[in-house]
Image (cartoon, helix red, strand yellow):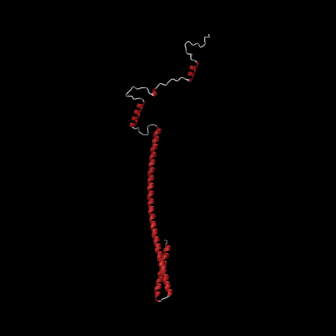
Amino acid sequence: MSTSEYDEIAQGMEDAQAELERAALEEEIPNKKRQAERAKTLKKLADSLARLREVEGSRKHENEVAGALRYMDKSTKQLLRAINAHTKKTNDLIEISNERLAQLEQELASGDDTAFAADPRVLAEGEFLKAQLGGIQSTEDPRPLFKDAVPPVIPSGLDVLSDAVCTNCFDDDFDPTGGVE
């Protein structure tokens, strides 16, 4: 409610009170006009009082709404603080992860060492599997592995063709001139 509205209601009540006081002084002389004025003034006073109660009720309602808005503002600020804290924590974790990832990438790119130490159990399992694929070493003699095998001799295409054309070329009885000297 604005100040001017409140002042207007207060002025109406003061006017009604002044008229009632004037009517009380003039009461000694009965007059229909005065009685009508008195009734009019009483109605004006009752209207002003009803309006004042209405304004007071709206002021109370406005206070309740303002309280609810203050509570919502407080809750929103708490929520925003929590979101900001969570975002900061998340950004810190991302930064740490990125630093560790860059470190791992650098270690892998340099080729000096592995990024992680090998698990001894995994290495032992690898050795066991290598021994199994190469043959059981404890129960039989070592035998050649596929990687140690002698490559087979594959004749070239020219050798195959010359063997097909000249089947008797390398016999001791073969005379290349055909007996003509």
- Tell me which residue sits at (46%, 69%) in the image: 61
Position of residue 47 in the picture relative to residue 141 (left or right): right
Quadrant in which residue 179 is drawn: top right
The quarter of the image holding the C terminus is: top right
Camera-side residue of 64 and 104: 64
Q: How many numbered circles are shown?
A: 0
- Tell me which residue sits at (45%, 45%) in the image: 99
> In the rendering, at what x and y percent does residue 31 appear?
49, 88
Camera-side residue of 58 and 97: 58
Outermost residue toward the top? 181
- Tell me which residue sits at (56%, 22%) in the image: 160
> In the rendering, at what x and y percent does residue 91 appear?
46, 50
Q: Is residue 29 above or below residue 6?
A: below
Q: Is residue 15 visible?
A: no
Quadrant in which residue 131 is drawn: top left
Q: Is residue 3 above or below residue 104?
A: below
> In the rendering, at what x and y percent does residue 143 appear?
42, 26
Camera-side residue of 66 and 180: 180
- Tell me which residue sits at (45%, 62%) in the image: 72
Q: Is residue 93 visible?
A: yes
